[in-house]
Every structure is written in structure tokens, then in C-alpha cells.
Amino acid sequence: MKDQINFDSTLPELVLDYLSSNYTINNCLTRCNNHGQCFYSNTTNSLLCKCNTHYEGETCEYDTRPCSSNPCLNSGQCVNDLINKTFSCQCSAYYEGRHCEWQIDLCKNETCSNRGYCQMKNNTIECKCFKG
């Protein structure tokens, strides 16, 4: 004997509403981004998306985590603060600033002998000397 499925009283109506609408399953498959769940609403007679955590928008297209826009520059690592809805950047050794946007001047406290001048090259300092 085959198993029988008992529908509650509202489910057949939803199925009929959906089947009589202009939507196909393809609309649902291509509609919701970021693994959102697509469902048919008989109240609005439309397909809607239920977004996963950290996503919003009509089609779940917006990532609401502060680091989603990659705000840290120069290989800085972004750290989400989801409670305060902000971020901080952990900068590499040679950069500083809120977004790791400023290169640290390694020559700032460096003195080169004989009126040579300091220059940075590949995150190291070199003293360039004049001829003689």
C-alpha cells in the first residue's frame, strides 16, 4: 500500500494559487541570492525571499556585514564587530590608519652618514650616498 499524504486545509489552496499564477519554478531558482529561500506568498500573490543571516534586500543581494565591502587596504585583515555593526582593520607591519591606507615612513627616524639620504624600497630602508 502506498503512503498517503494528508494535507492541512490551507496547503491545497496555496498549491492552486501558485499553479494559477504566472510564476514557474525557474523564477524561484534564479530569484534569491546568497542561498536565500524562495517562497510563494498567496497574500501578495508573488514570490518572496527569506534571507539568511547577514543578508537583506528583495532578493537577498546585500551583505550587511561591515567587512563585506573589503574596506581594508594594503593586505590589511578586516575584523567584523557584528554587535556594533562596525569593523576594524589589522594592518600589516608597514601600514597604519583606519583602513591601513598610510604607509609607515621607515625613514622618519633614520639618519644616513655623510649627507646620504634615506629611501624606502620593498619595505626596507636604504641609505643612498652621493658620489665620492
Image (cartoon, rainbow, N blue to C red):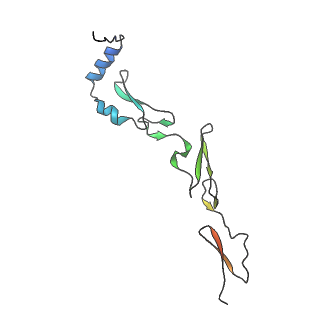
Residue 111 lies in quadrant: bottom right
Going by the image, does 40 lie left or right of 67?
left
Expressed as whole percent of the image width and height from the top left, the position of residue 54 reads 51, 36
Expressed as whole percent of the image width and height from the top left, the position of residue 95 reads 63, 60
- Name the residue at 51% across, 48% down: 69
Residue 92 lies in quadrant: bottom right
Q: Nearer the viewer, residue 6 or 9?
A: 6
Instruction: Determine the residue located farthest toward the front in the rendered image.
Output: 1
Relative to 106, is 73 above or below?
Answer: above
Going by the image, does 15 lie left or right of 52?
left
- Name the residue at 71% across, 69% down: 108
- Name the residue at 34% across, 34% down: 29
Going by the image, does 44 lie left or right of 53?
left
Instruction: Give the tally of numbered discs.
Output: 0
- Name the residue at 35% across, 28% down: 47
Quarter that holds the N terminus: top left
Expressed as whole percent of the image width and height from the top left, the position of residue 106 reads 68, 67
Relative to 101, is 87 above or below?
Answer: above
Q: Nearer the viewer, residue 123 or 103?
A: 123
Quarter that holds the C terminus: bottom right
Q: Nearer the viewer, residue 124 or 28?
A: 124
Instruction: Determine the residue located farthest toward the bottom in the rendered image.
Output: 132
Expressed as whole percent of the image width and height from the top left, the position of residue 53 reads 51, 33
